[in-house]
Amino acid sequence: MGIRTNRSKLYAMFFLLLLFSILKSPGYAKAAVTQSLNLNQTYTVKLENMTDSRLYEFHVPQAGNFQIHLKNTNPVGTQQISAQLYDSNNQPVTDSWKGSNIEMPNYSTKENRTFYLKLEGHLGIARTSFDLTVNFEPADDWEMEDNNTPANATPVLAGKPVYGAINDLNDDCDYFQFHLDSAKNISVTFGPKEVSGEKHLWKVFLLDSENHSIEIYRDSVTKTYRCRLKKGTYYIKAEDFLDSKNIAYSLSFEESDLKLEPPSISSLKATGHNRLLHKYVELNDIKIKNSGTAAGYTVKVAKKKNMKGNLVTENIDFDRENSKKKVSLKAKLEVRKAYYLQARSYLLTPFQEKIYGKYGAVKEKKLKDSVYKQLKK
C-alpha cells in the first residue's frame, strides 16, 4: 500500500507540474480566452473581486490604429480596473494601466495581427462594471508595429508624411525605410504631430544599408535635415530621448534630382623640376569653372587627348591650398611634351561617400620647349 501511495503522490505532483508548465507556456493565453471582441463594439465587463481576471482576444485584419477604452459605468465611481495588452506571442505590448476610466495609448499595427487584453480586478472592483471598447481606424499614413528593427521597417514614400509613436513598453524605437533609384538631394522633416516645443524630446538617426548611422535630430520642435545620398536603401530610426513615449510624431522626406555640372579647366601651370636623381613635372594652379555645388574635384591626367594612357587621377578635397576655383596636384609626373587634363565634381554624403558628376572638357597643357629640352637632357 505504501508503494502505491507514494506512486499516487508522484503522479499527482507530476500532473501539477505539467499543469503549471501549460499555464505558463505561450499557448496559455489563447487557451484561456474569455471572449473574442469585435472591433468598434462596446462590451460590459464585470469582475467579482481583486483576484478575478478576464482575457479577451481581438483580431486586426488591416493596417491601422486601435485604442482600448475602459469606462466605469458608475458616473461618480472611484472603483478601478487593471488592463494590459499582449501580442500573439504573449509578449506585453503596454505597461499595466489602472484606473476608473482608462484610455490606453494609440497603437499602430500592420495587417492580420491578433492581440490579447488582460483585465484584472483592482480597488472596489466588485461594486461596479466597466464598458470595454477597442476603437479601430484603418490607416495607411501611420507606422506599422512592430517596426523595431530594420528588417521590419515601415516603408515611406517621398512627399507622403507618416505618423508614429514610441509605445510605453517593448518599443524602444521605430524604423522607417526608403529607397533611392539614383543619387538624390533629400530632406527629412521630423517633429511632434500636434504641439511643437513641449518637453518631449526625440532622437532621430539616418542609417545606410550597412548600418552606418548619424544622428540628424534631437529636439522637441519640427526641424528639417538636408543632405545628399547615393543610390540605395536607407533607414530612419526614431527613439524616445525624454518623455516622448506615447506622443505622436510626424515624419516626412522629400527628394530631388542631384545636378553636378561638369567643370571646365580654364588654365594651369606646369612646373619642371630638375633634381640630381629625379626629373619631374608638377601641375598646379589649375583654375576651374563650375556653376554647381562641389565638395571637391577629381582631376585626371593622361598622355593622349582621348584621355588614354592615364598618368594620374587625384581626388582633391577643398582646404587651405585648394578651393572651388583653383586646385593643385600632388603627383610628380614623368616628363612629357604635353599633358591632357579633365575634371569632375563630387559631393560627400553624411557617411563620407563620394557622389561623382561627369567629366568636363579636355584641357591640353604643353611644356615650353626650353623647359622640355632641359628636363630631357
Image: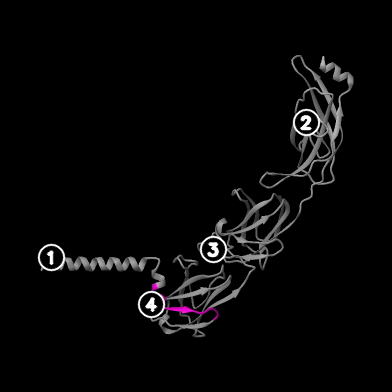
x 18%, y 68%: residue: 8
Q: Which mark is residue 146?
A: 3
The answer to whether one can see residue 320 in this image is no
User: Which kind of residue does numbered mark 1 sit on?
Assistant: Ile
Distance of label 3 from label 4 (alpha carbons): 31 Å
Cα distance in 3D space between marks 1 and 4? 40 Å
The crowd level at tag 1 (other Cα within 10 Å; few <14, some 14-19, many 20+) is few
Asked if residue 78 lies left or right of residue 340, the reply is left
| Rendered position, 224 above or below 21 | above
Q: Residues within 10 Å of mark 2 (few under 14, many from 20)?
A: many
| Percent coordinates x, y for residue 371 in the rendering | 86, 19
- The amino acid on which the numbered mark 4 sits, given as a three-letter code, is Asp
Vertical order, 315 against 39 (above or below): above
Q: Would you identify the image quadrant in which residue 139 lies?
A: bottom right
Q: Is residue 114 above or below residue 75?
A: above
- CA distance separating discs 3 and 1: 55 Å
Q: Residue furthest left?
A: 1
Where residue 303 sits, quadrant-wise, is top right
Split into 4 quadrants, where in the image is the N terminus? bottom left
Task: Where is residue 231? Give x, y as percent.
Answer: 69, 50
- Counting residues from the N terminus, which is met first, the one under dot 3 or under dot 2? 3
Asked if residue 349 can be seen in this view, the reply is: yes
SS label for mark 4: loop
Q: CA distance from mark 2 to mark 1?
A: 97 Å
- Residue that numbered label 4 is attached to: 52
Magenta stretch? 31-40
Does label 3 or label 4 sit earlier along the sequence?
4
N-terminal label among 3 and 1: 1
Q: Where does label 2 land, which residue?
A: 329
Q: Is residue 223 above or below residue 84?
A: above
